[in-house]
Amino acid sequence: MSSEHDHPQPGGAIYEPEAPIGEQLVVVAQELSDLYRSERAKAAELEQAYDQLQDTYQAAIRTLAFVVEAKDNGTRQHLDRTQIYGLELAAEIDPRLVRDPEVGVGFLLHDIGKVGVPESILTKPGPLTDDEWEIMRGHPLAGVRIVEPMQFLGEAVQIIRCHHERYDGSGYPEGMAGTGIPLAARIFAVVDSFDAMTSDRPYRKALTTEHALEEILRGEGTQFDPEVVRVFCDLVARTPWVAEGRYTDRAPD
């Protein structure tokens, strides 16, 4: 017995029924599965490339820091301490800064421009002459010239440029003032000065924490942002490892 589907259709063609809807869905599902596996493979490749890029980025940063350290034996711990102190203070003032990795890099590389300063000046046991100070004051812009081509450093460049600006506009290299100075640089100016004062230098012994804080307070509104000074003094008062310079003893994140 013949089926109605066997009957010739107009034009002599034999009608063939479409595949059942279930079979069509199976085909679609298989195509989606293949597409998913393909996209997962591409995502894995991109993630691997990103991880490699991050490793290269971190290696480049550490290499730059090592170059600065090689110029001055006392620089290594200063770089590490000021980066940690700076991030702790930034977390108190504006947590968004801490979430930006470029800020931490800027803190670490703030003195990269000192690679161009003669060691005879960096390690001089006595006061610098006017000419020597002129050379020393050139290190922020020298640092900018070194790192500016690395576009991935972003905000770090501004910290390197501005960390010796003063709140009253009498700093260098550009005489910026007040809130015209990037906040991260205003924060770093305080911790940089504090660490410098509480560390031994070729030309003097370290100051006590109390003496250093007195000097920081004396610079409030002239050298330093008053609000940053207030928060920093509060941070030191309730954070023993900052007050005592034991930055390796900080509480885990």
Image: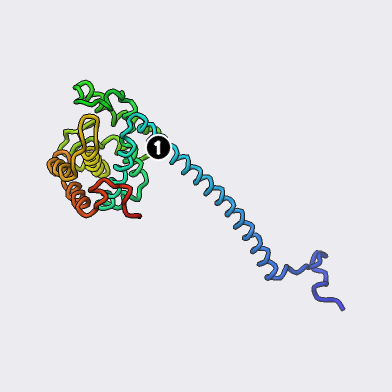
Residue at point 14%, 41% (across, down): 215
- Amino acid bearing label 1: Gln
Q: Is residue 244 above or below residue 9?
A: above
Q: What residue lies at 42% left-to-right and 35% top-to-bottom?
A: 63
* Residue closest to the far right: 1
Question: Circle 1 sits on which residue?
Answer: 151
Pick out the residue farthest to the top.
Answer: 131
**Residue situated in front as seen by the camera: 197 or 53:** 197
Mark 1 lies on a secondary structure that is helix
User: x, y (%) of residue 241?
Assistant: 27, 50
Quadrant for the N terminus in the image: bottom right
Any part of residue 54 in sight? yes
Measured as percent of width and height from the top left, residue 171 is found at: 19, 33
Image quarter in which the C terminus is found: bottom left
Q: Quick one: which residue is furthest to the bottom in this view? A: 1
Crowding at dot 1, Cα within 10 Å, few <14 / some 14-19 / many 20+, comes out as few
Residue at the image point whose x is 68% and y is 63% from the top? 27
Q: Position of residue 15 (x, y in %)?
A: 78, 68
208 lies left or right of 23: left
- Considering depth in this image, is 179 or 54 the residue closer to the camera? 54
Number of numbered discs on residues: 1
Q: Quadrant of residue 3?
A: bottom right
Locate residue 195 relative to residue 24 in the image: left or right: left
142 vs 240: above or below: above
Outermost residue to the front: 205
Q: Is residue 182 visible?
A: no
